[in-house]
Amino acid sequence: MTLQRRILILAVSVVLLAAVGVLAVLRASSRADEKNQAQAGGPQITRGEVSLTPGDGGRRIVFRNMAWGPHRDELATVPAAEPEGARTASGVSCLRFHSAAGTGICLQADKGGVQDGYRAVVLDAGLKELSAHPLAGIPTRARVSPGGHLAAWTVFVGGDSYAGTNFSTRTSVLDLRTGKLDASLEDFTILKDGKPYRSADVNFWGVTFAADERSFFATLATGGSTHLVRGDLAERTVTTLRENVECPSLSPDGTRVVFKKRVPGLPAEAPWRLYALDLASGAETPLAEERSVDDQVVWTDDRTVVYSLPGDFGADLYSVPADGSGAPARLMASALAPAFLG
């Protein structure tokens, strides 16, 4: 092959690669513009006031609106009795969200700096920003304690999925009464099988708080296994309780935890089933949802839990009884990260 022909082939290759790059950018831009257009048959959404005050306007759901259109990713609200009804959007955007007792935690993209990042924003009942904290990675879990005094969040600092093993997380807890931030639960003393434990591969995620505003449950991963741990913020300790537990969520009465559990034989990319654990007896009950749920459920009351599954526009919310009875039912389309208030 002559030198001239090699140069020609190289030039053509460069042009083709450039064309592919331009097409990818145009396609991404077109997709982004499409998401800003409301879809036919989608929920009615109007801009208005959204409150996190329990009982303000009756029992309500506040959530991340996933419906395409100008209010996508904003916190929105609907009456709990009409989950598929018209939505009121707040103008405040969150990637992950939770609220209790008039306090909200919003994990959001931060586009104000030289380089895009993420931050955790504490909100008051009127969605006013009280404080903000930079995040070290991609937001994935958020929780507020029942009394509204504590907030926790988890981010991926390496990898982007819980399905595999090649990821790293960081979980932080903020005491809103004192302003004290525990930047990483990895700094806590771990008691595993009754003995102090240390390992470089420790990861935590999925905090759920008890009503005493001091204790919590969470996931600890180490040595290729996951564990349910009970934490004590005052003592700065976590104690392992049970293996093969991820993303626990404590019931309002404090007696049960619903979690996702890896079940042998399921696909590697969809390995989980939801189970309820009775903390007193240790008995596990599989819930009626047979699909793989990669979410930390939210309790609507002492009988029912809600969780997300992939939907046409990002995610839909489903509910199922927490005692293993009944069947799953879609609660809301195009919604994520709900909080039930009132």
Image (cartoon, grey):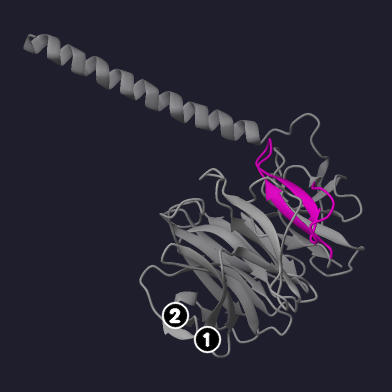
The residue wearing badge 2 is 187
Which residue is found at the position 53% from the left and 79% from the top? 181
- Answer with the quarter of the image where residue 81 lies: bottom right
The residue tagged 1 is: 236
Give the image location of residue 311, x and y in percent: 68, 39
Nearest the eye: 246 or 161 = 246
Q: Are marks 1 and 2 in contact (CB under 8 Å)?
A: yes
* Residue 262 picture quarter: bottom right
Q: Residues within 10 Å of mark 2 (few under 14, many from 20)?
A: few
Residue 237 shown left or right of residue 84 in the figure? left
Q: Residue furthest bottom?
A: 235
As drawn, the label of residue 283 is none
User: Which corner quadrant holds the N terminus?
Assistant: top left
- When the figure is inspected, residue 154 is found, relative to residue 39, above or below; the finding is below
User: Callout 1: 10 Å neighbours few (<14), some, many (20+)?
Assistant: few
Q: Which residues are magenta?
A: 303-328
Report the residue at 69% width, 60% height from top: 275
The answer to whether residue 135 of the structure is visible from this angle is: no
Of the 4 image quadrants, the one containing the C terminus is: bottom right
Q: Horizontal and vertical percent for residue 307?
A: 71, 53
Q: Position of residue 96 (x, y in %)?
A: 63, 57
Q: Nearer the viewer, residue 93 or 171?
A: 171
Task: Label 2: state its secondary structure.
Answer: helix
| Disc 1 to disc 2, C-alpha distance | 8 Å
Query: Magenta stretch: residue 306 in it?
Result: yes
Q: What secondary structure is found at the residue carrying circle 1?
A: loop
Q: Amino acid at mark 2?
A: Asp
Is 253 contained in the magenta span? no
